[in-house]
Every structure is written in C-alpha cells, then in structure tokens.
Image: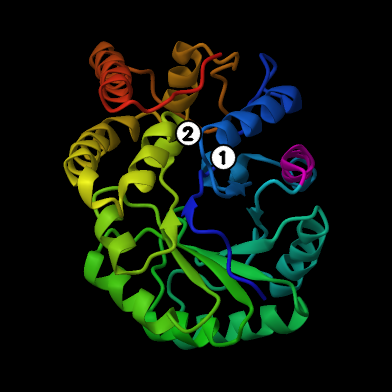
C-alpha cells in the first residue's frame, strides 16, 4: 500500500437543508471549496460530519457523493466503524470501502468499551482486520462516545501490519505524538494531527499532515501555513500565522459544527446552518468572537498575500 498524501486533510461538514435532510448539491459545492482552498485529502463521514446522527444509508451517500465529486483529484477517507459488534463493523467497512475511498477509518473507541484494556482492544482489532481482508484502514481518536488514545506500542503493532495508512491524533500532547511518529516512521501509516497548538512542531518532527476543524472555516490559512513551513525566509510569517490560528482555534470549538456553517455563510457560501447534533443557543459574546475570527482571517490573508476562495 502507498502512503497517503502529506498536507491538509479537512474533516468534512455535512450540509442539511431546511428540513434537516442531506443537501447533496451543497455537499458537492463544499467539496469543491475544500479542493480550491488547497486541501491535500478529505476525511468524509467523521465527527465533524455529524456521523453519529446519520443513518448507514446517509453515511454511504455522503461518502459516495464526495468520492464522485473529487473524481480522483485527491484521496478521500471515511469512518466505517459504528458498532462494538465486530461482525457488524466489518460488514459496514466493506460497504463504505466500495464507495471508492482510499482507506476506511476505525474510531479507536469502537472495538471495545471504555473499561476494555489494551489487550482486549488489540484482540478485537485483530478480529476486525481478519474479517475485512486487505481493505486499507485508518485510526481516529474520536472523542465521542469516549476518547480512547492509542498506546504507542499498539499503534506501532498495527502499523507493522501494513494495513493502516492514516492516524488522526487527538492527544494534544506533543511528546505522545512524537512517540507515535517514531513507532510508525518505517511504515505506510501517517500521523495527522488534529491539534493546532502542536501542529507545527509535530510536522517538523515527521507528522504527515494536519486534520483540524479550523479547515472547515478558513482552510486557506492552513494551506498558507503549510506552503511556508519549510521556507527559511518566511518563518516570521509562519510564526504569525501559527499564533493567529492558535487564538482562533480556542473560539471556533464553541457551538461546533453550527459555528463552522455560520462562518461559511458569513463568508458568502450558500449553506444552511442546520445541524442534527444538539447545541445550545449561541450567546451574543460568542457571535462577537466569531466575528473577530472573521476579521483576523481577512486581515491575515490580505497582509500575507494568501488567496482566499470567493463565492
């Protein structure tokens, strides 16, 4: 198996219409927006996609729609594990792989419950791998229904199988991330960091890319950061971008993914803000902070000459 592309991997939103049904036309336009903004790969049917509020049929439809829209221009991956029953998970993994994705992602909290020790996790993963043949896989330290961080030795064991191409890390711990990079460096598995504050240092150490939620609001800034990262003459710009992205990241997690859809709407993208996930009403101060993020986004893009997508 070949490694997945380095760079920016947005965790995709799912647009819903005013009846809260899938809006596939908007999903197609959203996919084009990610591509135009500099994405190197796309993670469909993930937590940002409100995957737990979708039916199996909807999960397959949104993934197939993204794959067909991309049409080979960049790789697409998607989550395929939604049951503690290994047989049920294996069957859905096969179905979603048939949509044309490059790898099926397994949420690390699915193979066993929160009380299950690492030996149980490994045993169940081994059964899942056996039942899914040679399908390329990935891992996602999804925080819902609970967060199970990968033990580095177990991650290395899975990486050595040659089946795993992607690991979305949500540990927010640079030392832990570095250890995971070390144990997978001679394999096809790439570590993709979801945590913005540790993003640059993890990339310099060997992470293959970033998968932050901020790539749903202002992906151009992340693309600009990655384009400048190894340019010695632009390290001040890298530092400026990184500082701003860290600040913005603390704001956009509130009322997410509603806030992301609202931000896109404010940018001029034609998308409804409807979500299926439960959320509390946004307070005026939260809306003001989101407007501040918008102002910083435009100021940075103009100051650093980062081209942004217009709608």
Confirm whether the magenta stretch covers residue 49: no
The image shows residue 303 at horizontal and vertical percentages of 25, 22
The residue located at (76%, 76%) in the rendering is 132
The residue located at (56%, 26%) in the rendering is 275
Q: Label 2: state its secondary structure.
A: helix
State the residue position of label 1. 12
Between residues 266 and 53, which one lies in front from this camera angle? 266
> Is residue 13 at least partly visible in the picture?
no
| In this view, 92 is above or below 150 | above
State the residue position of label 2. 216
| In this view, 197 is above or below 251 | below
Look at the image and tell me in which quarter the C terminus lies. Answer: top right
Magenta-drawn stretch, dominant element (helix, strand or loop): helix
Label 1 to label 2: alpha-carbon separation:
7 Å
Residue 53, by quadrant, is top right
Q: Are marks 1 and 2 in contact (CB under 8 Å)?
A: yes
| Relative horizontal placement of residue 256, taking residue 5 as reference (left or right) | left
Q: Which residues are magenta?
A: 61-71
């Amino acid at each position: 198996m070949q490694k997945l592309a380095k760079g920016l991997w947005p965790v995709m939103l799912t647009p819903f219409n005013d009846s809260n049904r899938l809006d596939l036309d908007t999903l197609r336009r959203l996919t084009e927006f990610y591509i135009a903004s500099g994405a190197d790969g796309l993670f469909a049917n993930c937590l940002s996609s409100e995957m737990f509020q979708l039916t199996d049929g909807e999960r397959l439809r949104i993934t197939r729609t993204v794959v067909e829209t991309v049409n080979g221009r960049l790789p697409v991956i998607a989550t395929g594990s939604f049951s503690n029953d290994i047989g049920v998970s294996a069957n859905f993994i096969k179905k979603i792989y048939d949509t044309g994705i490059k790898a099926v992602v397994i949420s690390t909290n699915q193979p066993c419950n929160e009380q299950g020790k690492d030996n149980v996790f490994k045993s169940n993963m081994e059964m899942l791998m056996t039942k899914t043949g040679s399908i390329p896989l990935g891992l996602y330290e999804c925080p819902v229904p609970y967060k199970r961080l990968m033990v580095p030795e177990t991650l290395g064991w899975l990486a050595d199988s040659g089946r795993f191409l992607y690991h979305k890390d949500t540990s927010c711990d640079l030392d832990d991330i570095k250890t995971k990079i070390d144990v997978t460096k001679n394999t096809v598995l790439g570590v993709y960091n979801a945590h913005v504050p540790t993003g640059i240092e993890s990339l310099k150490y060997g992470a293959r890319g970033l998968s932050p939620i901020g790539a749903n609001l202002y992906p151009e800034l992340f693309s600009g950061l990655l384009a400048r990262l190894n340019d010695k003459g632009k390290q001040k710009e890298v530092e400026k971008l990184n500082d701003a992205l860290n600040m913005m990241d603390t704001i956009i997690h509130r009322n997410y993914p509603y806030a992301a859809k609202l931000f896109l709407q404010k940018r001029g993208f034609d998308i409804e803000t409807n979500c299926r996930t439960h959320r509390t009403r946004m307070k005026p101060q939260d809306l003001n902070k989101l407007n501040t993020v918008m102002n910083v986004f435009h100021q940075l893009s103009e100051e650093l000459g980062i081209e942004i997508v217009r709608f």
